[in-house]
Amino acid sequence: MNEEEKLRADEAEEQKAETPGSEAENIPKAEEAADGASEEKAEEKAPEEPSEEEKLKAENAELRDKYLRLLAEFDNYRKRSVKERREIYPSATAAAVEAFLPMADNFERAALAECSDEKYKAGVMMIMTQLQNAFKKLGVEEISRAGEPFDPALENAVSQITDENLGENVVAQVYQKGYKLGDKVIRHATVVVANC
């Protein structure tokens, strides 16, 4: 029986090899099918060349983005320049006015001095008035607050007195006028303070 069983097993194997659905035949076919499927997937995944219209749209979007960025940068530059000019102008004006203040003080002293020549005194007064008008056009204001409460932000106290006619911490006398441009003090007024 052993020999018969062997013969039968050999015949069964031969029949399997001859039949179209045999394992030996199926292996190469499976490999071919797998190769074909991967080629189809590769063809499907391969990117298509963009059309001329799509290229132009992409280029247009890129140029538009550059334009908008450039426009925003220019707008920021313009705003920064305006801000810098606004900040620089008062400082430059204050520096120029400060250079003229000793001259204004001297013209004021000359106008207050006694003089026998009326034409000379009128000329000095005219120059002093022109200088004061120029200061007003620039927005410069005098700080001369005699009789008002002492403000250390506007005035420098150089001495103090006791005066029953004045209140406490009041400016009794102004030695030298101060000047300011807006909120910026160009020169503090030099004053005498009463009852501090």
Image (tube, helix red, strand yellow):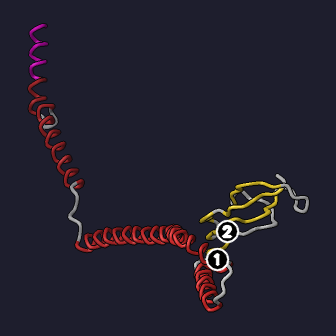
- Image quadrant occupied by the N terminus: top left
Q: Is residue 6 magenta?
A: yes
- Residue farthest top in this picture: 2
Residue 171, numbered circle:
none
Residue 177, numbered circle:
2
Residue at point 38% right, 67% down?
69
Q: Are marks 1 and 2 in contact (CB under 8 Å)?
A: yes
Secondary structure under the numbered disc 2 in the rendered image: loop
**Spot occupied by residue 177 in the image (x, y as percentages of width and height):** 67, 68
**Earlier sequence position, callout 1 versus callout 2:** 1
Classify mark 1: residues with Cα within 10 Å, few (<14), some (14-19) or many (20+).
some
152 lies above or below 72: above
- Between residues 71 and 38, which one lies in front from this camera angle? 71
Magenta: main secondary structure? helix
Query: Does residue 25 appear to the left or right of 87 in the view shown?
Result: left
- Residue farthest right in this picture: 164
**Spot occupied by residue 15 in the image (x, y as percentages of width and height):** 11, 28
Residue that numbered label 1 is attached to: 108
